[in-house]
Amino acid sequence: MRSTALITAAALAFTAAGAASAQPAPIATDSAVVTVALGPELQKKTADFGARELADLSNDLRTQVQKSVDHAHGVPPTRVALVIEDAVPNRPTFDQLGRTIGLSMRSVGLGGARVSGLVTYADGASRPIKVQYYETDLRQERGVATWSDAYIAFDRVASDIAHGAIPASYRGPGPTGSGHFGYPFTNQ
């Protein structure tokens, strides 16, 4: 019994030592810090869209902008703080599908997103950014993902930051729908 305990303790110590040495050392990078938050208008839609959907959406924007900044042309920013002011899905979210009988991923709507924020450079200069994209014609809707049009807006944000062409005001049409699939929904 005592030898089993000693062998177990030795095995645990060896495993812990191996795990400690297997951890990669932190890498110092000059990459920008990218943060994404949800705006008040979008937070009101959490009960309808689902908290997980919105967390995934903000993570998608953060990842896309981070990749673009890491491969930026010219002088890359050191900090990018973004807010997803509004987002409208093209297809019902997982929560909407689970809540309403009759909805499917074939249900389609006009989607898009509005993003604002602040891009800060190493010299301390900051520039506001405002980008929105909303589809206006259902006949032009080609996306098969829940957030297809929102991803187009995210592409524009990432591209604008990477190329240093940062718009300070929204251009193009605003939202044409709420993104609410499935009635009745009491928290509108």
Image (cartoon, rainbow, N blue to C red):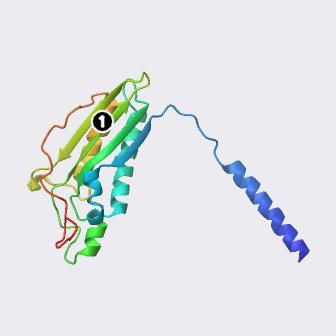
Residue drawn at point x = 42 percent, y = 34 percent = 79
In the drawing, does residue 134 fall left or right of residue 31? Answer: left
> Which image quarter holds the N terminus?
bottom right
Task: Note whether 180 is above or below 127 in the view shown.
Answer: below
In the drawing, does residue 157 fall left or right of residue 26? Answer: left
> Which image quarter holds the C terminus?
bottom left
Q: Quadrant of residue 105?
A: bottom left
In the drawing, does residue 123 fall left or right of residue 53? Answer: right
Total numbered circles: 1
Q: Quadrant of residue 129?
A: top left
Q: Among all residues in the image, which is located at the extreme top? A: 123
Task: Note whether 101 is above or below 148 in the view shown.
Answer: below
Task: Note whether 77 is above or below 82 in the view shown.
Answer: above
Kindly identify the amino acid type of the residue bearing the numbered disc 1. Ser
- As helix, strand or loop, the secondary structure at mark 1 comes to helix
Q: Give the x, y percent position of residue 30.
A: 50, 31
Q: Viewer-proximal residue, 109 or 42?
A: 42
Q: Give the x, y percent position of residue 33.
A: 45, 37
Q: Is the residue marked by circle 1 packed among few (<14), some (14-19), or many (20+) residues within 10 Å?
A: some
In the drawing, does residue 33 fall left or right of residue 10? Answer: left
Q: Which residue is mark 1?
A: 159
Q: Viewer-proximal residue, 165 or 117?
A: 117
Q: Give the x, y percent position of residue 139.
A: 9, 55
Q: Give the x, y percent position of residue 16.
A: 74, 57
